[in-house]
Image (tube, grey):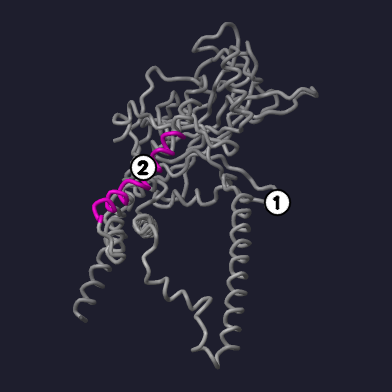
Amino acid sequence: MAKVRILIFTLVLFFSLNVHIHGFYLPGVAPQDFQMGDALMVKVNKLTSTKTQLPYSYYSLPYCRPEHIVDSAENLGEVLRGDRIENSPFVFKMRESQMCAAVCRVKLDKKTAKAFKEKIADEYRVNMILDNLPLVVPVQRPDQDNVVVYQHGFHVGLKGIFAGKKEEKYFIHNHLTFTVRYHRDIQTDSSRIVGFEVKPFSVKHEYEGQWNEKARLTTCDPHTKRAVTNSESPQEVEEGNEIIFTYDVDFQESEVKWASRWDTYLLMADDQIHWFSIVNSMMIVLFLSGMVAMIMLRTLYRDISNYNQLESHEEALEETGWKLVHGDVFRPPTNPELLCVYAGTGVQCFGMILVTMIFACLGFLSPSNRGGLMTAMLLLWVFMGLLAGYASSRLYKTLRGTEWKRNALKTAFMFPATVFVAFFVLNAIIWGQKSSGAVPFENLHRKIQ
């Protein structure tokens, strides 16, 4: 036994040293090195909001489009989460800053202006990805100095009163100031991306002469070093207005290493956690649990008092109250099949949750692996069907059941069929809203890698 322990300890120590020396990354995503001038492709993801739970594709709004929109291959978890990862017209070059790069000009009609206004009113955010890193917006806390937190994505726009007008207007964020942080290897002069930030602005751009790809902007000009630093003259969203989308790119060297680049995302300031709903649910559960506990305690106290008073002539009395429980424990219930199905499904859920938590604690379900958590849960749910069948059959045999085939079929189909019907109905409703959260059954095989 001692030799076995020494062998296990040696293997664990060797594995730990190997992980430390070779930089093995558990999620399986290898670092990518970039040389100076290498192209960096920015990808766009879904539009999300904290006010509504329906995500939408980035190109559901009339943003600037590349010549050909290419969908990235996604895993099953990403598809179910509503992720729609596509290419974008934003192209960077490693360690080469850009200033006031014009992307395109969009003229709003009634339909496109309404689409932008709806997304701005619902506080939708634009999500982008660079080298598998989500885009974040640095936000400084007003109550604490020099403390910067981050939020996922930037808002499509904002609404408010401008220039003393009483009517509330909608303004779009059409200028993006990107900051790409990289860690440089001095020996090979290669760089690894460790941060992807943005500061959005709303600017009503002006230009000289007629618009073309080489038109010179007067509000943002790299030749005169005039950069966008505020939104004093915002771009209003209204029918007939033209919107010019521009961006800046700044590369900053960072001391953060590639293995620690996800530590920043632990300081997220997103308000997507519905604290009121959580506290409300917890209070209801505690209140109901307290009521049930009080009723049970009072019942037990009354029965025990009666038993103590009648202890002297207990044999002459008929058993009542809690003493009758011993007869019900070994008596089969009225519907044993349904009980066995519920017990097997509970074992299946418990096994899935337990194994998922173990993998998460070991680091296999890193946030860098988008959709990995949901994919792992679905696969584990399928594999844990073995435990569900065993637990259900074992309990059914204990209750002296005879229709074991019917019991096995009910365990395999009752709960999954109920969930699938509810999922199909909800998916049809979401699909009717043209949300990216709907599962695209027609081209699901092409999207999943």
* Residue occupying image coordinates x 59% and y 54%: 281
* Secondary-structure class at tag 2: helix
Looking at the rendered image, the quarter that the N terminus falls into is bottom left
Q: Residues within 10 Å of mark 2 (few under 14, many from 20)?
A: few
Q: Which residues are magenta?
A: 403-426
- How many other residues sit within 10 Å of disc 1, few (<14), some (14-19) or many (≥20)? few
Q: Residue at x 33, y 45 (%)?
A: 31
- Residue at the disc numbered 1: 143
Q: Report how far apart the C-alphas of labels 2 and 1 lie in the structure.
A: 51 Å
Q: Residue furthest top?
A: 210
Please tell me the numbered disc located at residue 417. Answer: 2
**Against 391, is 295 above or below?**
below
Dot 2 or dot 1: first in sequence order is 1
Mark 2: amino acid = Ala
In the rendered structure, the answer to whether residue 382 lies left or right of residue 51 reads left
Q: Nearer the viewer, residue 185 or 304?
A: 304
Asked if one can make out residue 186 in the rendered structure from this viewpoint, the answer is no
User: Could you tell me residue 154's position as x and y percent?
Assistant: 56, 34
Q: Quadrant of the C terminus?
A: top left
Q: How many marks?
A: 2
Q: Judge whether residue 447 can be spotted in this image.
A: yes
Left or right of 87 in this view: 396: left
